[in-house]
Amino acid sequence: MGQEQQQKAKGLIAVFTGNGKGKTTASLGLAFRALGHDHRVCIIQFIKGSWKYGELESAKKFAPLLDFHVMGRGFTWKSDDLEKDKKVALDAWQFARKVIEENQYSMVILDELTYLPHYKMIDEQEILAVLKSKPEELHVVITGRYASDELIELADLVTEMTEIKHPYRSGIKAQKGFEF
Amino acid sequence: MGQEQQQKAKGLIAVFTGNGKGKTTASLGLAFRALGHDHRVCIIQFIKGSWKYGELESAKKFAPLLDFHVMGRGFTWKSDDLEKDKKVALDAWQFARKVIEENQYSMVILDELTYLPHYKMIDEQEILAVLKSKPEELHVVITGRYASDELIELADLVTEMTEIKHPYRSGIKAQKGFEF
């Protein structure tokens, strides 16, 4: 037991995917847990707007342990300027790659990253290569729909969030303090 | 739009169920969001130990907005004193009921509540009755496996977390700052 506990910590690759609510909030909960250990956490948001006012305000309480970067701009399926979108996506990914490689955090959350390869904004092989050679103790958490089979294969922990019921479908509008 | 925004807020009943990781962490993320609005949140933990050191430390940053109550004691399937367990479960539920009815919070999280009716520790009909008559603006978040059909029917938002991959199954031990 003692010997086991002496082992170097292993950083996990976790993926929260599926169409249900709770992917970003679950990553947020992991951040909250890591921060409680005074571990440094970096959150990179690839789709602008996925993090809401509430969590952004809460995040401030954890400065300087928690860094938060909004990289995207609704740059996926609604765009009318695909080349510009690809540039934004690539810049965002290069930033994330640098953060991972520089190894200054205990946990890096790549929120909604999966949409980028899914919509052919960036090459998934490059993401997989960076994840495979990530610093050993670093935890990387990836959220978003459409996680690929290869990403799932590479990850240590994968949870699929499936929507069983969604309030919007019952005509309930988004509620402050719950959904934003 | 303006008129719509004047509508009284509607408190949602959200359920995170399924066998995958992320149920408690997703509820934690919702708490984090609500706290960012300076909303009051009460977390009641029905299974002792489901919340770990990391989040308990982080939670302290949000006092006095966040109250946290550990009610259970591994009181379900491993017990050798069923009557005592039932008593503990019933006391915990009565406490939660009081918290809901007194309406002093914006959000009440009933972490791992589902195990109690599943293991016949308390009558689910009583839980459903309390939820049906909860204060209108109060959000209630319930986590745990085995959410019943009736609870799902009553809820506004239900996400099923399904385990696709779990690190323990690959022989990776629990990692500080990630799983506790």
Image: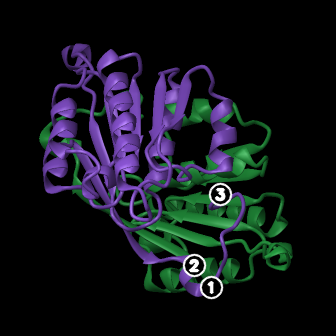
Chain colours: A purple, B green
Name above or below for residue B74 compared with residue A175: above
Name above or below for residue B153 compared with residue A132: below
Badge 1 vs badge 2, beta-carbon distance below 8 Å: yes
**Closer to the camera in the image, B46 or A10:** A10
Which corner quadrant holds the N terminus of chain A? top left
Secondary structure category for the residue under label 2: helix
Identify the chain of the residue marked 3, using the numbered disc in the image: A
Name above or below for residue A126 compared with residue B116: above
- Please identify the quarter of the rendering in which residue A133 is found: top left
In the image, what residue occupies the spot 61% across and 77% down? Answer: B127
Circle 1 residue: A171
Secondary structure category for the residue under label 3: loop
Q: Amino acid at mark 1?
A: Gly
Same chain shared by disc 2 and disc 3: yes
The disc, 2 or 3, on the residue closer to the chain's N-terminal end is: 2
In the image, what residue occupies the spot 83% across and 75% down? Answer: B8
- Please identify the quarter of the rendering in which residue A11 is found: top left
Secondary structure category for the residue under label 1: loop
Q: Which mark is residue B101?
A: none
- Crowding at dot 3, Cα within 10 Å, few <14 / some 14-19 / many 20+, comes out as some
The disc, 3 or 1, on the residue closer to the chain's N-terminal end is: 1
Q: Which mark is residue A168?
A: 2
**Closer to the camera in the image, A13 or B102:** A13
What is the count of numbered marks? 3
Q: Give how far across and how far down residue B41 sits, in percent.
A: 72, 52
Which corner quadrant holds the C terminus of chain A? bottom right
* Residue A23 shows in this picture: yes
Badge 2 vs badge 3, beta-carbon distance below 8 Å: no
Circle 3 residue: A180
